[in-house]
Image (cartoon, rainbow, N blue to C red):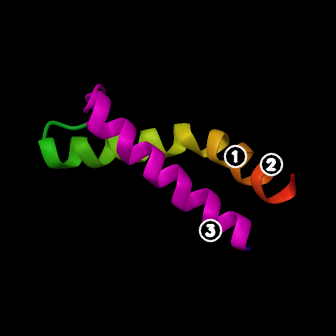
Amino acid sequence: MAALVLTLILAFVMAGLGWFTAGSRFAFAEDSSENDLANLVVYTLGCLPVSFVIVFFGIGG
């Protein structure tokens, strides 16, 4: 359970940093606030496998 929480938190932090760095590259909605949120969700889903590997090898290794 702790690994799942750590994975989600790390993915969200990595996605936030990526979003601040790269910005809203994808156009999902016309409203800018909805588009920013959609981009953050997509970045979080993209960072999920990387954060899983970091947590898995960090805790297990």
Position of residue 25 relative to residue 4, above or below, is: above
Residue under numbered circle 1: 54
Residue under numbered circle 3: 5
Identify the amino acid type marked 2: Phe
Q: Residues within 10 Å of mark 1 (few under 14, many from 20)?
A: some
Identify the amino acid type marked 1: Ile
Q: Residue at position x 54%, y 54% from top?
A: 10
Position of residue 19 relative to residue 22, above or below, is: below
Residues at marks 2 and 3, CA–CA distance in whole angstroms: 15 Å
Residue nearest the observer in this picture, 49 or 20: 20
Element at label 2: helix
Considering every residue shown, the one lying at the far bottom of the view is: 1
**Image quadrant occupied by the N terminus:** bottom right
Element at label 3: helix
Identify the amino acid type marked 3: Val
Q: Residue at position x 44%, y 39% from top?
A: 43
Residue nearest the observer in this picture, 25 or 16: 16
**Which segment did they paint magenta?**
2-28
From the viewer's perspective, tell me whether residue 52 is left or right of residue 46.
right
Residue 5 located within the stretch drawn in magenta: yes
